[in-house]
Amino acid sequence: MIDPAIHDVPVAINSQSVRRALRFLLASAIVFIVFVFVAYFLTFHDSVSLKQETWGQFGDFVGGTLNPILSFLSLLALVFTVLLQIHQLDIARAELKNSQSELTATREELKRSADAQHLTATALEEQAKHAVISAKLAALSSALSVTTEALTQARSESAFYGHFSADKLLQRKEAINSEILNITEQLCGNQE
């Protein structure tokens, strides 16, 4: 965003005013040239001379009259173009400063975005870990349920349940309970 103060410069410095001034200076130069020639021929209305010294005097008159006028008009044109360049440099500096501040703001926003993405990734990793643990606990809970039911059935029938005896089922149930307790302790330990 360009600094509004840059555009509050006097009208004499904007590019259209400079163009108008340069056109005016060019038109003035043409008028002065025509005026000098007309003045010479009206004052010294002799016919065209074949003498070299007459042509030399004509050249001295035209050069002596027009050179200072055209030099002054050239100086004015130079001043106008320098003012325009200064104005354009001020605008360029303001745009550069604004670009730098926008770049700084963009960098800060990207850093915040990267930090947020890092936090999101960390949270997703934690959620994934908890989902794996939760799935493992659910599977162990199901296995415990099946083992408990098989153990109950084996005790009520006092026989073998499939190829497992009641003792083996009891050992399996204790192993599953132990694993569930270990996982639960790890979860509680990670949260502290």
Image: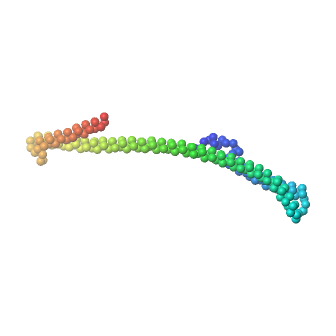
Left/right placement of residue 75 relative to residue 93 reads: right
Residue 42 percent across, percent down from the top left: 89, 56
Figure quadrant of residue 173:
top left
Visible residue check, residue 99: yes
Q: Quarter of the image for the N terminus: give it.
A: top right
Q: In terms of depth relative to the viewer, which is nearer, 7 or 52?
A: 52
What residue sits 12% from the left and 48% below the top?
Answer: 163
Figure quadrant of residue 117:
top left
The vertical placement of 68 against 169, above or below, is below
Figure quadrant of residue 95:
top right
Residue 125 percent across, percent down from the top left: 34, 44
Residue 37 percent across, percent down from the top left: 84, 57
What residue sits 70% from the left and 44% below the top?
Answer: 11
Q: Quarter of the image for the C terminus: give it.
A: top left
Q: In terms of depth relative to the viewer, which is nearer, 71 or 185?
A: 71
The vertical placement of 23 against 171, above or below, is below
Q: Residue furthest right?
A: 46
Left/right placement of residue 12 relative to residue 129 reads: right
Left/right placement of residue 87 relative to residue 119 reads: right
- Total tally of numbered discs in the picture: 0
Residue 24 percent across, percent down from the top left: 76, 51
Q: Residue furthest left?
A: 158
Q: In terms of depth relative to the viewer, which is nearer, 134 or 66?
A: 66
What residue sits 69% from the left and 42% below the top?
Answer: 10
What residue sits 59% from the left and 44% below the top?
Answer: 94
Visible residue check, residue 18: no
